[in-house]
Image (cartoon, grey):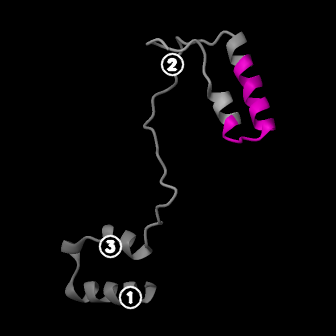
Amino acid sequence: MRAGPASQSYGLQVAQLAGVPGHVIKRAREKLMSLEHHDVDTTRQAPRSTPQQNDLFAAAPHPVVEALENVDMDGLTPREALSLLYQWRDLI
């Protein structure tokens, strides 16, 4: 082994050892060959955007939590606040 970058990626071999289905490996190999044999314009930059990471296990916020976050607490009368509490209780 030598320090530095590898001359090739071993991702497909690792995927095969991991048991990825053969048709998936075949398609990935075709895509890799296509990318290796065609010039890719590396000078063109994609538009910048903020990357989004979705949490697969995050629960959707409860409607009461969303409503509470949007309430102007300082602008409510005591009667309006009590009314909201009753409405939210019915949602729980």
Regarding residue 73, the answer to whether it shows in the image is: yes
CA gap between label 3 and label 2 equals 42 Å
Residue 3: x and y in percent read: 43, 13
CA gap between label 2 and label 1 equals 51 Å
Q: Which mark is residue 50?
A: none
Question: Does the residue at mark 3 contact the one at mark 1 (Cβ under 8 Å)?
Answer: no
Pick whichever, 67 or 12, lies toward us: 12
| Residue in the picture at 62% in, 24% down | 10
The image quarter containing residue 78 is bottom left
- Number of other residues with Cα within 10 Å of mark 3, as a class: few under 14, some 14 to 19, many 20 or more: some
N-terminal of the two: label 3 or label 2? 2
Pick whichever, 90 or 78, lies toward us: 90
N-terminal of the two: label 2 or label 1? 2
- Number of other residues with Cα within 10 Å of mark 1, as a class: few under 14, some 14 to 19, many 20 or more: few
Residue flagged by tag 1: what amino acid is it? Arg
Which residue is denoted by mark 2 in the rendering?
45
Residue 18: x and y in percent read: 66, 40
Which residue is denoted by mark 3 in the rendering?
68
Residue 16: x and y in percent read: 71, 35
N-terminal of the two: label 3 or label 1? 3
Which residues fall within the magenta stretch? 17-33
Q: Vertical placement of 11 versus 43: above or below?
A: below
| Residue in the picture at 45% in, 34% down | 49
Residue flagged by tag 2: what amino acid is it? Gln
Residue flagged by tag 3: what amino acid is it? Leu
Which residue is denoted by mark 1 in the rendering?
89
Instruction: Check the picture and name the quadrant holding the C terminus.
Output: bottom left
